[in-house]
Image (cartoon, rainbow, N blue to C red):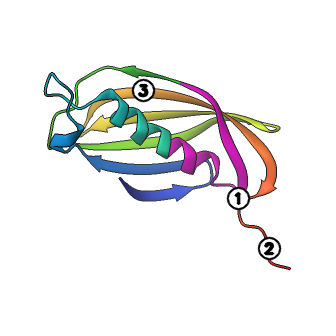
Amino acid sequence: MRLDGVVPGGAVLSMTVRPDMANGHGIGHGGFVAALADSAFVFACNSRGVVTVASGFEIDFLEPARVGDVLVATARETVLRGRSGIYDIVVRRGETVVAVFRGRSRSLGRPVLEEES
């Protein structure tokens, strides 16, 4: 995976599907697609400098990914209320939507980078 960008509440990651990422049907294993989306989620929900973890997610696979495909996961903050957030991530191959992921987050209320004393 490659981190292509982070903004407050958002992130973009990309990944090329390799042969070792294919399942028994010769298509990209859903676990790798989910890992890409989850990684974009992690960067987006931690982008405000507060340690934030997942409280759950769901993913819908809409199109198969194939070996050689470059997948791009774009995460955006949909709701941030108190310590809870909802993030929507779309995984695309070019203009084609491969998967849609919704993550729920919970802030732990401490900074990502602790100041040294």
Q: Which mark is residue 57?
A: none
Question: What x and y, as percent, mark residue 7?
Answer: 56, 56
Task: Count every numbered label the image shows and give the total.
Answer: 3
Return the disc, 3 or 2, that comes first in the chain's sequence: 3
Which element type, helix, strand or loop, lies under badge 3?
A: strand
Amino acid at the residue labelled 2 = Glu
Which residue carries the number 3 mark? 100
Q: Which mark is residue 115?
A: 2
**Residue neighbourhood size for the residue with mark 2, other residues' Cα within 10 Å, grouped as few (<14), some (14–19), many (≥20):** few
Name which quarter of the figure residue 4 lies in: bottom left
Residue linked to disc 1? 49
Calculate the distance from the C-alpha at mark 1 to the C-alpha at mark 3.
Answer: 25 Å
| Depicted 69 relative to depicted 103: above or below | below
- Magenta extent: 40-57
**x 47%, y 35%: residue:** 89
Q: Give the label, 3 or 2, closer to the camera.
A: 2
Q: Secondary structure at mark 2?
A: loop
x 15%, y 41%: residue: 19
- 47 falls in the magenta region: yes
Q: Residue at (72%, 66%) from the top-left corner?
A: 113
